[in-house]
Amino acid sequence: MHIPVLVEKVIEFLNPKENHIYVDATLGCGGYVREIFKKCPNCKIIGIDLDEEAIQFCNIYFKNFIQNDNLIIIKDNFINLKKILKNLNIEKINGGIIFDFGLSMLQIKSGRGFSFNDESLDMRIDPSTTKLTAEYILNNFSEQQLSEIFYKFGEERYSKLIAKKIVEYRKNKKITKAKELKEIVSNIIKKKKKKIFFPSNKEILEIKFTPATKVFQALRIFINNELENIEKGIDEAIDVLDKNAKIIAISYHSLEDRIVKNKFRERKDCKVITKKPITPDILEIKTNLSARSAKMRVAEKI
Ligand SMILES: C[S@@+](CC[C@H](N)C(=O)[O-])C[C@H]1O[C@@H](n2cnc3c(N)ncnc32)[C@H](O)[C@@H]1O
């Protein structure tokens, strides 16, 4: 099961109350929805996700809340938030809206190329919206195009070298497995380590990263148009928020976080509540490694 990141902080900021409507724009396995209902079983939540597997999982998991009309689950892109709410005859969201970018455990274990295992290189969140898979890109895009994707969407400093090695490799064999891509990159870059310092208890945590992490991230962002979606989604969310309602966004890399930070600053109709992003403490990272690079920002509609 997916462990929701910074869940206590999310609930603290949302402070769920009866007669309020909340939107979880990235429903996943419903970790935040579960906690909102624990605090306030009678409030109303709209849960959105683009991934059919997430929708199927939550339709079963939250069956009772759906039957009682407390939860409405919609398979759609969060960039269509205004349209989704219009179809539901909801004008404004008076509770709050959550975005939790990145991947759910369901996706990592889906065998669709989101992990480094021996699985197909698909990486589409919603296969019905695009034919472009990671396998197609890796075997057909030019060296220059690949290098640009790795640099732009993965901030990978070895982007040119990785692209060159991919093109050399595919002359002999088509790249079809996530594990294969991981190995091509691992032959070029050594295992990466990152040290995180926690001032509160003066502890340092050393985390190992698979060298191919940024290449996988870049392909996923490119295929699913993730950065553009975040920009549009946050704008839509701020537009539909009622006065004093909050928007919470949790990012997992600097490209996502920069968009959230700039959007919150740029919009004159919302006030930033978190001057600095909130990050998980050492205990949360030790129990849930997926939380290691999470950054949460909160703003309030004015
Ligand atoms: C990190 S997971 C969310 C996990 C969730 N908070 C939980 O606790 O289970 C992110 C989810 O966002 C979904 N997603 C990504 N881009 C989306 C988009 N543009 N519109 C709707 N859902 C999207 C993914 O399919 C994935 O299920």
Image: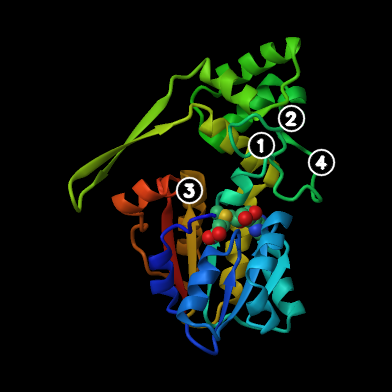
207 left or right of 234 in image: left
| Amino acid type, label 3 | Tyr
- Give the CA separation, mark 3 to mark 4: 26 Å
Left or right position of 132 against 104: right
* Residue assigned mark 1: 113
Callout 4: helix, strand or loop?
A: loop
Q: Which label's residue is closer to the chain start, 1 or 3?
A: 1
**Residue that badge 2 annotates:** 135
The answer to whether the residue labelled 2 contacts the one labelled 3, judged by CB atoms less than 8 Å apart, is no
> Is there any visible trace of residue 268 in the rendered image?
no
Q: How is the image coloured?
A: rainbow
Residue that mark 3 sits on: 252
Q: Which residue is mark 4?
A: 131
Q: Quadrant of the N terminus?
A: bottom right
> Any atom of ligand 1 within 8 Å of the CB at mark 3?
yes
Question: On the rendering, which quadrant does ligand 1 occupy?
Answer: bottom right
Q: Position of residue 188 (x, y in %)?
A: 51, 16
Q: CA distance from mark 4 to mark 1?
A: 15 Å
Front one among 260 and 21: 21
Q: Is residue 251 above or below residue 141?
A: below
Query: Amino acid type of disc 4?
Result: Lys
CB under 8 Å between discs 4 and 2? no
Give the image quarter of residue 29.
Answer: bottom right
